[in-house]
């Protein structure tokens, strides 16, 4: 079945980058000249996603406003002949009815956030994109996952190698028979101790998941960290249906922390034709002191 829908859990408080996120959602923090959430939605759109489901929380209304049409701005730009700016806004404007927003009323974990989207997803396979993670590659990470799902017929998660001492911060996969970057999974453990981790392959916030995951999330079982974990629900699918890990080799920036956010801004500015030269010159000046 074609992957038509994606879930974006955006209810988090952004505590790792306070005080910037005290009043501003972390998903709206700017990378060069557009909010982080715009990059993630564009990634999903390029993978063929048609319906975008946002699981939000309090003080997240600005995300919905960002993807809405602002009549006053459009009118002003048109009156002033700002065609280039109008074109930029048009690129990020979703089709009418393509976005849905629901609330996660309590911080019960990522698994609970995905469960909150169940009525919009129905019994279709769907993508999950964590907006903290900014992925840069061609084709996009989500497009690669969709292609892997079409090949395997089951769930697929994106993974990358991390230092063993960092396994306690990720969902870690156990695999067998890897070929061409795609491996059958035999297990998935949430935040294991380094000495107990089955590998150093970490789930990095992009997945295509079969709808049976909702059958396990429905039970609201509390797992690691006292939260309802998506990884633990996905782990229960392993062995009952195809489940693979896809080794992702593109750029990845964890924008949920200060250094990752800074790195993303620099890397994307250097990668754009309209900002690369000035950014490189700025870095040289700063390095010279």
Image: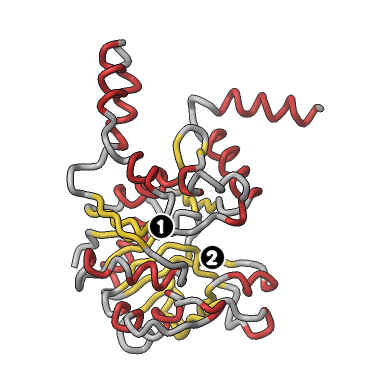
Q: Is residue 23 left or right of residue 243?
A: right
Quick one: SS at disc 2?
strand
In the drawing, what numbered circle is on residue 57? 1
- Seen from this angle, which residue lies furthest top? 80
Dot 2: within a 10 Å radius of its alpha carbon, few (fewer than 14), some, or many (20 or more) residues? some
Q: Position of residue 157 (x, y in %)?
A: 41, 69
Q: Residue at x 36, y 89 (%)?
A: 239
Question: Mark 2 = which residue?
Answer: 160
For the question of whether residue 38 can be seen, the reply is yes
Earlier in the chain: of badge 1 and badge 2, it is: 1
3D distance between C-alphas at marks 1 and 2: 29 Å
Q: Nearer the viewer, mark 1 or mark 2?
A: 1
Dot 1: within a 10 Å radius of its alpha carbon, few (fewer than 14), some, or many (20 or more) residues? many
- Seen from this angle, which residue lies furthest bottom? 239
Which quadrant would the N terminus be assigned to in this image?
Answer: bottom left
Residue 229's place in the image compared with 7, above or below, is: below
Which of these two is toward me, 189 or 118? 118
Q: Residue at x 46, y 48 (%)?
A: 27
Res. 233 image quadrant: bottom left
Q: Is residue 168 left or right of residue 232?
A: right
Which quadrant would the C terminus be assigned to in this image?
Answer: top right
Quick one: SS at disc 1?
loop
For the question of whether residue 246 can be seen, the reply is no
- Seen from this angle, which residue lies furthest right? 289
Which of these two is toward me, 222 or 2? 222
């Amino acid at each position: 079945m074609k992957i038509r829908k994606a879930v974006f859990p955006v209810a988090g408080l952004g505590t790792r980058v306070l005080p910037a996120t005290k009043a501003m959602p972390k998903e709206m923090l700017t990378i060069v000249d557009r909010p982080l959430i715009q990059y993630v939605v564009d990634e999903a759109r390029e993978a063929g996603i048609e319906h975008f489901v946002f699981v939000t929380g309090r003080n997240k209304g600005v995300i919905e406003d960002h993807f809405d049409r602002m009549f006053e701005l459009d009118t002003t730009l048109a009156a002033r002949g700002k065609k280039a700016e109008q074109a930029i806004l048009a690129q990020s404007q979703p089709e009418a009815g393509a976005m849905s927003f629901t609330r996660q009323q309590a911080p019960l974990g990522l698994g609970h956030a995905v469960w909150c989207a169940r009525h919009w997803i129905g019994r279709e396979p769907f993508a999950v994109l964590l907006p903290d993670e900014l992925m840069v590659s061609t084709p996009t990470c989500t497009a690669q996952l969709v292609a892997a799902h079409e090949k395997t017929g089951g769930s697929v998660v994106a993974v990358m190698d991390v230092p063993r001492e960092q396994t306690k911060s990720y969902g870690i996969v156990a695999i067998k028979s890897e070929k061409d970057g795609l491996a059958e999974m035999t297990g998935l453990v949430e935040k294991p101790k380094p000495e107990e981790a089955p590998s150093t392959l970490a789930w990095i916030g992009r997945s295509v998941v079969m709808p049976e995951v909702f059958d396990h999330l429905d039970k609201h079982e509390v797992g690691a960290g006292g939260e309802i974990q998506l990884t633990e629900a996905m782990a229960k699918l392993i062995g009952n249906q195809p489940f693979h890990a896809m080794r992702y080799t593109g750029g990845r920036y964890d924008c949920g922390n200060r250094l990752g956010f800074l790195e993303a801004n620099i890397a994307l500015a250097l990668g754009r034709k309209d900002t690369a030269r000035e950014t490189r010159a700025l870095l040289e000046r700063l390095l010279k002191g």
